[in-house]
Image (tube, grey):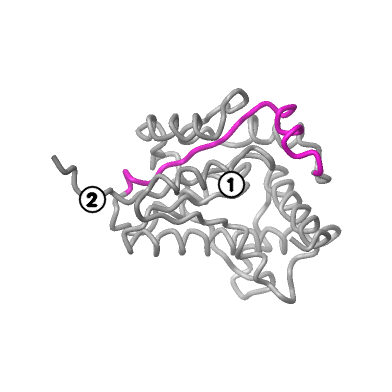
Amino acid sequence: MSTGPERPRIIAITGIPGAGKSSLAQALAERRERSVHLRADTFRRLIVNGAAPVVGGPAHEELFQLRMHHQLAADAAATFSAGAFSVMVQDVFLGTAWPHFLGRLVDYPLAIGRRNVHAVMLAPRPDTVQERAPAWSGPPLAELDAVLREDTPRIGLWLDTTAMGVAEAADHVLAHLGEAVPDPAALPDPLPVSAPGSPSGRVVSRHFSPAEVEHARTYWTEERMRRSTGA
């Protein structure tokens, strides 16, 4: 007996660098008939001139660009879902960036419905992550792990993948999608994306938490590594 077409879903996946986000997103996407593996950092890599400096730049510029490419990722995910594609969108969302990104997703009048937006945080032990990412030269992974565990709201499905392979992790996520639905009450209104120095002044004047600043620094450290290797 036919069960009908698959219901499109958006699954947002996050964790510290080396946690296995790309592998899990790809594995989940390969299990759907119509699917997209959306790497949110693609949008920041499209900037030719004017990218926020990797180090030493003003935090508000880094955070503005971070929010901008998160907004673009949410726009793309919503657009793909409107075309009946399931979307696995992955990036490093730490601190308040996690609930704000999810807030952007559920703020759309999604054709698939909010109950089909899911949030997955990968939280393997930092020593395991270090083994997976031996070339990482950014902030200490243990410090980023502390930001994840202490400063990132526990929204959606938090998964310790220390002892899991990719296939097992994908099985677990699919079996627990109900637990991965964000509670709308836990999500803030989306932050404005205003260029530094714009008339609104919203981004410049807003106070950024230490976790947000560290999040931005981590992103641009990753970008420096990509540029140096030509990836």
- In the image, farthest residue toward the left: 1
Q: Residue 174, how many percent across, how many down?
A: 39, 35
Q: Amino acid at mark 2?
A: Pro
Q: For this rendering, which residue is in front, 213 or 32?
A: 32
Other-residue count near label 2 (Cα within 10 Å), few / some / many at <14 / 14–19 / ≥20 = few
SS category of the residue bearing label 2: loop
SS category of the residue bearing label 1: helix
Residue at label 1?
22
Please give the name of the residue rendered at 18% of the width and 42% of the height, measured from the top-left corner.
3
Q: For this rendering, which residue is in front, 136 or 178?
A: 136
**Which quadrant: the N terminus?**
top left
Q: Residue 91, how many percent across, how many down?
A: 59, 50
Q: Residue 167, how many percent across, how many down?
A: 50, 33
User: Of the residues under marks 1 and 2, which one precedes in the sequence?
Assistant: 2
Asked if residue 50 lies left or right of residue 119, the reply is right
Residue 160 lies in the magenta-colored region: no
Residue 129 lies in the magenta-colored region: yes
Other-residue count near label 1 (Cα within 10 Å), few / some / many at <14 / 14–19 / ≥20 = many
Q: Residue 44, how many percent across, how many down?
A: 65, 64
Please give the name of the residue rendered at 45% of the width and 43% of the height, measured from the top-left corner.
28
Number of numbered markers:
2
- The part of the image, by quadrant, that contains residue 186 is top left
Q: For this rendering, which residue is in front, 97 or 134?
A: 134
- Magenta range is 114-135
C-alpha span from label 1 to label 2? 26 Å
Q: Amino acid at mark 1?
A: Ser
Whether residue 198 is situated above or below residue 205 in the rendered picture: below
**Which quadrant: the C terminus?**
bottom right
Residue at label 2?
5
